[in-house]
C-alpha cells in the first residue's frame, strides 16, 4: 500500500494505491473497474466534500497506473486507513460516517446527519490468498457487507452503512477455487473477522469533526 498526496480544488487530498500486478482476479462495486475480472491495482482516492464531477471513472483512471484496475473514492481521510488481518486474509477500510443510512429506509426518509456536511463513505478492500469461483466472490461481498454492518451496529451508529460505500475483493487468478464465501466457510469466516475488526476500529475512532 502506497500513500501519496495531490492538490485538487485547493485541497490536499490523499490517494492509496495497492499494486498487485498480473495474476489477480477481483470483484468490486467500484465505479472504475467494477464487476468481476482480472485487475492489476486498486486505488482509494480522497476527493473533496461535495464532489460533483460527472466523469468519476475517468478521473479515477487518471490517478492510477497504466493497465486495468479498480478505483474507489471517498471524502474520508485515506491516511487513516485501518488494516486488520485474520489467517492469511487482509482487510483495509477507510471509514467516514457523517451520514449513516439504513438500507431499507422508507421512501423519502431523511438520513440522520452526524455532522453538517453530507458526505460519508466506507470503502473496503479485502485480499485473500485463495482463488474463488464467481459465485464464491459474490458470496464474499455479502459476507463483507454483513461484517461491516455488524461493526456499525456494535459501535452504535444508526445505519447499515452509507449510501456511497464501495467494496473490492482481490484473489489469485490461478489455483484450486474455493466454492464458498459465506461467514461460516473457512475463508469467509476469516474475511468476516478481518473486515469486522477494520471497520469497527475505524468507526470507533471516527468523530463528527473529522473529514468523512
Image (cartoon, rainbow, N blue to C red):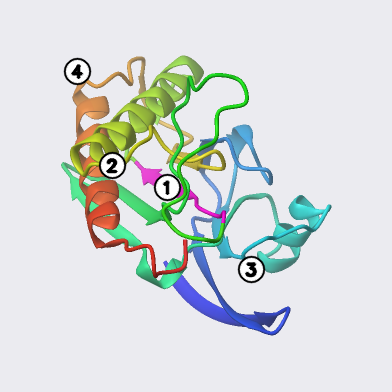
Q: Residues within 10 Å of mark 2 (few under 14, many from 20)?
A: many
Question: Which is more N-terminal, label 1 or label 3?
Answer: 3
In this rendering, position of residue 199 left or right of residue 166: left
Residue 144 locus on image (x, y percent): 35, 32
The residue that disc 3 covers is 48
Which one is in front in this view, the residue at disc 2 or the one at disc 4? Answer: 2
Q: Is residue 81 shown above or below 28?
A: below
Tell me what residue is drawn at x 58 percent, y 63 percent: 45
Residue 80 painted magenta: no
Q: Are marks 2 and 4 in contact (CB under 8 Å)?
A: no
Q: Closer to the N terminus: mark 3 or mark 2?
A: 3
What residue is disc 2 on? Answer: 195
Residue identified by numbered label 4: 184
Residue stretch rendered in magenta on the structure: 118-127
Q: Quadrant of residue 106?
A: top right
Task: Check disc 1 and report its element: helix, strand or loop.
Answer: strand
Marking on residue 125 = 1
N-terminal of the two: label 2 or label 4? 4
Amino acid at each position: 500500500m502506497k500513500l501519496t498526496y495531490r492538490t485538487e480544488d485547493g485541497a490536499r487530498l490523499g490517494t492509496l494505491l495497492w499494486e498487485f500486478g498480473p495474476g489477480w482476479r477481483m470483484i468490486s462495486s467500484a465505479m472504475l473497474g467494477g464487476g468481476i475480472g482480472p485487475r492489476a491495482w486498486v486505488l482509494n482516492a480522497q476527493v473533496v466534500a461535495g464532489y460533483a464531477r460527472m466523469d468519476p471513472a475517468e478521473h479515477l483512471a487518471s490517478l492510477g497506473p497504466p493497465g486495468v484496475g479498480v478505483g474507489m473514492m471517498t471524502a474520508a481521510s485515506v491516511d487513516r486507513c485501518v488494516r486488520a488481518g485474520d489467517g492469511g486474509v487482509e482487510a483495509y477500510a477507510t471509514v467516514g460516517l457523517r451520514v449513516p443510512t439504513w438500507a431499507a429506509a422508507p421512501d423519502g426518509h431523511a438520513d440522520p446527519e452526524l455532522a453538517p456536511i453530507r458526505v460519508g463513505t466506507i470503502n473496503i478492500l479485502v485480499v485473500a490468498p485463495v482463488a474463488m469461483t464467481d459465485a464464491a466472490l459474490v458470496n464474499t461481498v455479502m459476507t463483507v457487507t454483513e461484517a461491516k454492518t455488524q461493526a456499525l451496529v456494535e459501535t452504535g451508529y444508526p445505519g447499515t452503512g452509507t449510501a456511497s460505500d464501495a467494496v473490492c475483493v482481490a484473489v489469485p487468478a490461478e489455483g484450486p477455487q474455493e466454492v464458498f464465501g459465506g461467514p461460516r466457510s473457512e475463508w469467509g469466516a476469516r474475511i468476516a473477522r478481518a473486515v469486522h475488526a477494520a471497520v469497527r476500529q475505524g468507526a470507533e475512532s471516527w468523530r463528527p469533526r473529522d473529514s468523512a
